[in-house]
Amino acid sequence: MRKSLFNIKKMDCPSEENLIRMKLDGHETIIKLDFNIEDRLLLVYHDEDDQQILKSLESLMLDTTLTKTEETDEIVPTDAKVQSKLLWQVLIINFVFFVLEMTFGLVSNSMGLVADSLDMLSDSFVYGLSLFAVGTTVVKKKKIAKLSGYIQMGLAIIGISEVFRRYFFRDDIPDYQLMISVSAFALIANWLCLYLLQKSKSTEAHMKASMIFTSNDIIINTGVIIAGILVSVLDNRLPDLIIGLVVFVVVMRGAFRILRLSK
């Protein structure tokens, strides 16, 4: 058996981990995938040629390079149960934050919070559909991936349309205090969860990083906080609309990646 280490520079969130898992599902000689999202690394235990795996990863356009391949005698258990457990964890976390941020986003009239909540919901769809796909055929997984991609794209289009509608037809300013407080809570929760996962010293590397509280989510939370501060200082709704538009574009980008994978 061999183990190959890949550096995937654009792998920075759990959605991309799932894309990679589904892409490599067709390689029957892959025994185990061990993800380290924080360091953008993927360790693959396999029997086949590493160049075939590299070719599949490169097709995702995530800037992948093969660092090394070596023979190993390690006893490596399959990770189907671990994958299911991971997907349940991130699904629950994403959906809970979707409900919280959508509720307070509507109350505060903040597109930034609404956009962040829909980002959470789109991730929930990804993980929910991935859970349904565990153990099924490659063809079925790709069909499920395509459905997930269209759902994300639909959410993004609705969100972008709402941003422009508010820009041209509404002039109410969001409640910046709720924007800042809710986003600050989400940001603290993100860091705390990541700290606890790292402290747990799980033997499964991807269990420590493949959750909702990743760098993209932290950046988005910080962006909403900054937008709330700017709304307060400028007494203008534009910063909130801008951060909302940025997040919807991120959701749209994720949808295109999933649809490309499902071909």
Image (tube, rainbow, N blue to C red):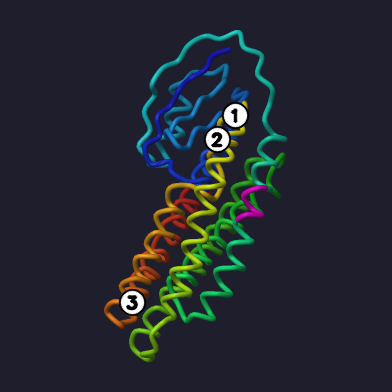
Left or right position of 63 against 146: left
The residue under the point 43% across, 41% down is: 11
Decide which of 179, 141 is in the foreground and name it. Answer: 179
CB under 8 Å between discs 2 and 1: yes
Q: Classify residue 250 as left or right of residue 23.
A: left
Q: Which residue is mark 3?
A: 231
Residue kind at label 1, given as amino acid type: Lys
Which of the two labelled residues, at mark 2 and mark 3, occupies the earlier sequence position?
2
Q: Are marks 2 and 3 in contact (CB under 8 Å)?
A: no
Which residue is pictured at 51% across the width and 39% down the height? 20
- Three-letter amino acid code of the residue under disc 2: Gln
Q: Which residue is painted at 52% across and 61% down in the image?
A: 185
Of 8 and 37, nearer the camera is: 37
Query: Can residue 124 be seen?
Result: yes
Task: Report how far apart the C-alphas of labels 3 and 1 lie in the structure.
Answer: 41 Å
Q: Which residue is mark 2?
A: 198
The alpha-carbon separation of the residues under discs 2 and 3 comes to: 35 Å
Residue 151 at x, y percent in the picture: 56, 64
For numbered disc 3, what is the local secondary structure? helix
Q: Amino acid at mark 3?
A: Val
Return the disc, 3 or 1, that comes first in the chain's sequence. Answer: 1
Q: Residues within 10 Å of mark 3 (few under 14, many from 20)?
A: many
In the drawing, what numbered circle is on residue 201? 1
Q: Position of residue 51 (x, y in %)?
A: 43, 22
